[in-house]
Image (spheres, helix red, strand yellow):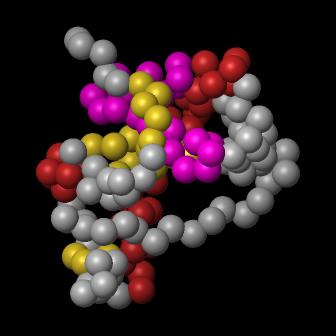
Amino acid sequence: MSGEPILGKAHAEPHRDYKLLTWPRFLRLRAWAQRMADHEHASVYLVGSALTKRRPRDLDVSIILPHDRFVAQFGPVPREDPNGEPHWEDPGSMANYMQRLHLYLYERRYPWWAEDMHVRYTRVDLKICPDSWWPENDKLLLAAPREA
């Protein structure tokens, strides 16, 4: 199993950053997450600073797949170096790998679904990842796939 990827921060956008996660906004976020959970047949979680900060910079949302399913769908995750960090064969490998994941989310139109749910004025950092990344970090289940 692989360790955690190293991810960069997006540029600040004052009109979308550091917003309170009010109850109505949380309910809209859950509705959006439920659509994704049903579509992906996978659970969707709120992770990151929104779990601990009153005004998080953004809302980190992760679609978390079982490791084997993730590998089958997106290819092998990077191997770990001796320190337990992911090792990328060349500097562009991580960017290419993460770009594939972002393209998948955009092709599925999930960011536009956020607009439909009126979540668009909040920065939502959406990721899809295997359960082998950040296994011990706190997460709040937003939605689980409903039975078909």
Residue 36 counted in the magenta span: yes
Quadrant for the C terminus, please: top left
Give how far across and how far down residue 72 sits, in percent.
Answer: 15, 52
Q: Residue at x 22, y 76 (%)?
A: 79
Quadrant of the rendered structure where residue 81 is? bottom left
Quadrant of the rendered structure where residue 28 is? top right
Residue 112 counted in the magenta span: no
71 relative to 41 in the view: left or right: left
User: Foreground residue, 87 or 49?
Assistant: 49
In this rendering, the answer to whether 84 lies above or below 138 is below
User: Foreground residue, 147 or 105?
Assistant: 147
Q: Residue at x 77, y 59 (%)?
A: 12
User: Foreground residue, 21 or 111?
Assistant: 21
Chain part drawn in magenta: 30-52
Give how far across and how far down residue 62 sits, in percent.
Answer: 44, 44
Q: Is residue 128 visible?
A: yes
132 relative to 116 in the view: left or right: left
Q: Residue at x 58, y 27 (%)?
A: 29
